[in-house]
Image: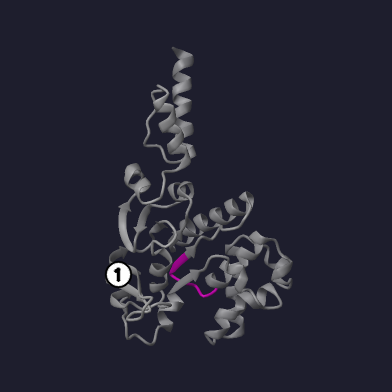
Amino acid sequence: MPVKMEQVSHIYMQGGPFESTAILDIDLEIQDGEFIGLIGHTGSGKSTLIQHLNGLLKPTQGTVIVNEIRIEKGSRELRAVRQQVGLVFQYPEHQLFEETVARDIAFGPKNLGLPQEEIETRVREAVQLVGLPYDEIKDRSPFELSGGQRRRVAIAGVLAMRPKILILDEPTAGLDPRGRNEILEEIAALHRERGFTVILVSHSMDDVARLVGRIIVMNKGQIALTGTPEEVFAHADRLKEIGLDVPQITSLMMALKEKGMDVPTDIYTVDQAKAVLRKILEGRRHA
């Protein structure tokens, strides 16, 4: 289910004294099954962009096309889009409100008018997809769970709608390192096993470098760079100009290079660095 944005702009409070252009003339195409990393400093337009993809915001100008459904300024019936595009906001656990985990996850499917048997099937499936034990937590209050578990329950509520596209806005914000890694691994597993199109909004260059296949860099409401992690992080100077950076492991390799160590600097993940450094150390042992 490809997604296209054609000359999309969004202006908040258009015509008023506080008029503000959030995104400007965005042309973008996302193919089925892609894993996209969307990065940019605060205020760069990331959140505005993703809210256009399921019709929460409509373009001031231009057109968004999701599986041949057009979203334009005057569009009204967007239910079909929202069933296909699941959006998980930052701190989604703040939106939990039901008495039990199962009832909270069932809220979306229930509003679709599905039969009870189908709702229960979707709830169980969604809980399992996010790596939680269904029988142990289905009757518990969401507010009794850990922060990481509540985050997973919130994501499960979106997955129960069976979207084709999953958008996650800073899904690990506020979590401890263990919870953060668990959430990211679950997202990566969903992409591998289910073939979802995933759009991950993140401030972490390290997470983006490790997980995604393509990066989109936002700056001042426009797309500044796009390409594979290798292609984007090769523009270290440009990234620094717009307030971003390369992954920490890349910075480490650059520092080693400056110290005279013969190492490549186009390294963006810990696993890549391990392989390179191991090869260097083995070469020295055999020298």
Residue located at (38% from left, 76% from top): 18
Whole-percent x and y of residue 5? Answer: 30, 70
Judged left or right of residue 42, residue 93 is right
Whole-percent x and y of residue 40? Answer: 40, 56
- Give 222 or 55, whichever is nearer the viewer: 222
Q: Give neighbour class at mark 1: few <14, some 14-19, many 20+ (Cα, 10 Å).
A: many
Q: Main secondary structure of the magenta part?
A: loop
Q: Quadrant of the C terminus?
A: top left
Residue located at (35% from left, 75% from top): 19
Residue farthest front in this picture:
17
Question: What's the residue type where badge 1 is placed?
Answer: Met
Res. 24 image quadrant: bottom left
Whole-percent x and y of residue 215? Answer: 37, 54
The number of discs equals 1
Please tell me whether residue 26 is drawn above or below residue 36 in the rendered image.
below
Judged left or right of residue 203, residue 115 is right
Q: Quadrant of the N terminus?
A: bottom left
- Give 57 or 97, whichever is nearer the viewer: 57
Q: Which residues are magenta?
A: 160-167
Residue 165 forms part of the magenta stretch: yes
On the question of residue 123 being in view, the answer is yes
Q: Which residue is mark 1?
A: 5
Residue located at (33% from left, 68% from top): 23
Please tell me whether residue 262 is drawn above or below residue 232 in the rendered image.
above
Residue located at (46% from left, 16% from top): 284
Res. 95 image quadrant: bottom right
Whole-percent x and y of residue 11? Answer: 34, 75
